[in-house]
Amino acid sequence: MSMKNTLFYRRNQEVKFDFAAEEISSDGAIILTEKIERKFKIIRKFCKSLSDSRHQSYVSHDFEDMLKQRVFLMVQGYEDCNDEKYLRNDPVIKAALDSDLASQATLSRFENSFSVRDIYEMSLQFLDDYVGSINPKRKKIVIDADGTDDPTHGKQQFSMFNGYYKQFMYNELLFHDGKTGQVILPVLRPGNCHSSRWFVHILSIIVDKIRARFPKMKIIIRADAGFSGAEFYKLAKAKNLKYCIGLARNERLKKFTETAEEAVRAGYLEQGEKHQFFAGGFEYKADSWEHPQRCYAKIESTGKGMNVRYFCSNMEGQTARELYWDFYVKRGEASENRIKELKNMCFADRLSCHSFGANYFRLFISCLAYEFFRIIKELIKKSGEKEASKWQINNIRLYLMKVGATIKMSVRRVTVSLSKSYVCRELFCKIVALC
């Protein structure tokens, strides 16, 4: 044990360490991210909305380079600007970015350099990029709208107390494509906003953008009870939108289902049995609504208690059970689970800058990273790998993106040598061939 590089003895074996290996990166599969960017130009398209007011003679890193660095490193699991100091000498990352890494200070100035007008232009560009990605053969688009809380732990601008969540927070509003899971538009709101704040106005813009390119596109809105309101139903009628949306329980709604509730309670709940009964449609009109809506109810004995949910829809030709199970509940996978990935795995909850504009921009960065993973998911499905097709973003990052690699560079060639023990070798090759 006198040698400093001897760790311990395992039976008769001496376990040692040294630093004689070649330069090895733990992020070898970042080259896949670069290939996806070259094909789909996710970052380049978004950068059209970024106006750089810096004196170009003093610029070492343009906005596209810095945004690429932030997004690429976020894909690899590095969530903050200060991760740069641990990665500045990584040979594979530098090769993928085709430049030295920008410093933490430079990246921080970059994130804090945008005005409210810039954020608005970014939002329009993000929406235009989505509309441009729609397959012209599609006949309908399901738009899932949902909000989520983002707790704050500092003095961020517009971090406010929300009585429903009982915390200081930002309130994020996210629109998803119900078929592909693609983020249509992310919106950052002050923490004290109601779920429906800005919803109708922004939805109107989204619908107009889609219809401008696809005039005959059928658009269906799917959302929970927080988005139900008079303004939404006015918009749905004016824009010829179909919808299936939740309703908050109230005393007037209860009267429509009280007989059915009593029957389910007596026949199943008291016996400790599980049972579902669907009622409707019935006509219901809140005082603020211009017209009555066709509403439905799911009355469920869970075996431990009663669970009654109301929803309304103008979609025809389907029973209450079909509307609920074949359409409405699918928002859980299409929207809610995607929001969990965006927040927890693409770090959309890391809005820790002081400026509201900088935090809004960070939300865009997380959504761009999410889009890379969404494309990788689609490629995995096309590859035919059934087990990998079930992976969430964390699994993709851990199994596919994090792999040891070395790099050799010459004037005419760059060779990234991935580890021989790479467990996703075949999957990686299939994805590269597909994109």
Image (spheres, rainbow, N blue to C red):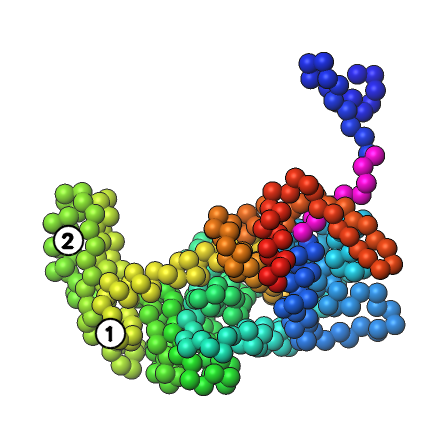
Query: Foreground residue, 128 or 225?
Result: 128
Question: In which quadrant is the N terminus drawn?
Answer: top right
The residue at the point 40 percent across, 58 percent down is 332
Q: Residue at x 29, y 60 (%)?
A: 325
Which image quarter: residue 232?
Answer: bottom left
Identify the disc placed on residue 264.
Answer: 2
Is residue 347 magenta-colored?
no
Would residue 388 appear left or right of 7 to someone viewing this image?
left
Which residue is disc 1 drawn over? 317
> Magenta: predominant secondary structure element?
loop
- Estimate the spatial distance between the alpha carbons at disc 2 and disc 1, rounded to whole Å: 26 Å
Q: Quadrant of the C terminus?
A: bottom right
Task: Specify whether residue 420 is in view.
Answer: yes
* Disc 2 crowd, CA 10 A, few/some/many (<14, 14-19, 20+): many
Residue sitting nearer the eye, 382 or 20:
382
Residue 278 in the image: state x and y as whole percent.
20, 61
In the image, residue 104 above or below residue 240: above
Q: Position of residue 243 (x, y in %)?
A: 34, 73
Q: Are marks 2 and 1 in contact (CB under 8 Å)?
A: no
Residue type highlighted by circle 2 = Val
Observer-side mark, 2 or 1, equals: 1
Q: Is residue 114 above or below residue 4?
A: below
Q: Neighbour class for label 1 at 10 Å: few (<14), some, many (≥20)?
A: few
Pick whichever, 392 or 154, lies toward us.
392
Is residue 25 within the magenta segment?
yes
The image quadrant of residue 48 is bottom right
Q: Which residues are magenta?
A: 20-29
The answer to which of marks 2 and 1 sits earlier in the sequence is 2
Disc 1 is placed on an element classified as loop
